[in-house]
Amino acid sequence: NAGVTQTPKFQVLKTGQSMTLQCAQDMNHNSMYWYRQDPGMGLRLIYYSASEGTTDKGEVPNGYNVSRLNKREFSLRLESAAPSQTSVYFCASTQSGGTADNYGYTFGSGTRLTVV
Amino acid sequence: AQSVTQPDIHITVSEGASLELRCNYSYGATPYLFWYVQSPGQGLQLLLKYFSGDTLVQGIKGFEAEFKRSQSSFNLRKPSVHWSDAAEYFCAVGVKGTYKYIFGTGTRLKVLA
């Protein structure tokens, strides 16, 4: 099994450009998450989807939108990229139905985004 | 508010030496507790987890962690470190009844040959 697949792996955007980060999981997991990782700040939750058809804001949702296209796919869109969105973005999934539990996450390998 | 603290930003050990990475949490009850490892350029991989029962849990790659309620700690240990263990390690707490998983800021491990 591939687990959680993210595309692209690297991206450079100019300020104001838009792009969509793609995430797909093949484990039949219910919940999917988008995090950003910045040095010294750990991981911060952007958006999550407890189940197909639902999405909710996390800690740092401003400047982002998400779509849970189906049970497998959860995309993150930057409508007008800003330098502050330079970061490494991780998608994750878990079996649970949204609330924290003991399953833990399966993470993708990340998208390194630079906004100039 | 719930929080996770990893007091050591960087740790350096010699290959073959023992390792302990510290994690302290602030939470009103027993949370779900996790340790993840991140190799350079990779995503995070689950090492082990605790949610109830035996306070010493075993994980992959020879790691173990001990939950100490009285100290609000969940420290990660390995008896003998291998060069391939060089990575960044994250402690995380799952807040029951919410979507929240709170991550610490990570400890970067360097292994000397």
Image (spheres, grey):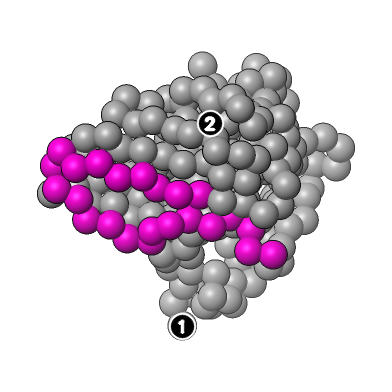
Q: Position of residue A43 (x, y in %)?
A: 44, 40
* Badge 1 amino acid: Ala
* Badge 2 amino acid: Tyr
Image point (39%, 30%), residue name: A65
Q: Nearer the viewer, residue B22 or A46?
A: A46
Q: Which residues are magenta?
A: A1-23
Q: Does the magenta portion include B55? A: no
Q: Is residue A99 above or below residue A86?
A: above
Image point (58%, 62%), residue name: B19
Q: CA distance from mark 1 to mark 2?
A: 41 Å
Q: Chain of mark 1?
A: B
Q: Can residue A88 be seen from the camera position used here?
A: yes
| Residue holding disc 2 | A48
Q: Does the magenta portion include A16? A: yes
Image point (53%, 31%), residue name: A48
Report crowding for label 2: few under 14, some 14 to 19, many 20 or more residues within 10 A (C-alpha).
many
Q: Nearer the viewer, residue B112 or A17?
A: A17
Residue B113, labelled with which disc?
Answer: 1
Q: Position of residue B49 (x, y in %)?
A: 71, 45
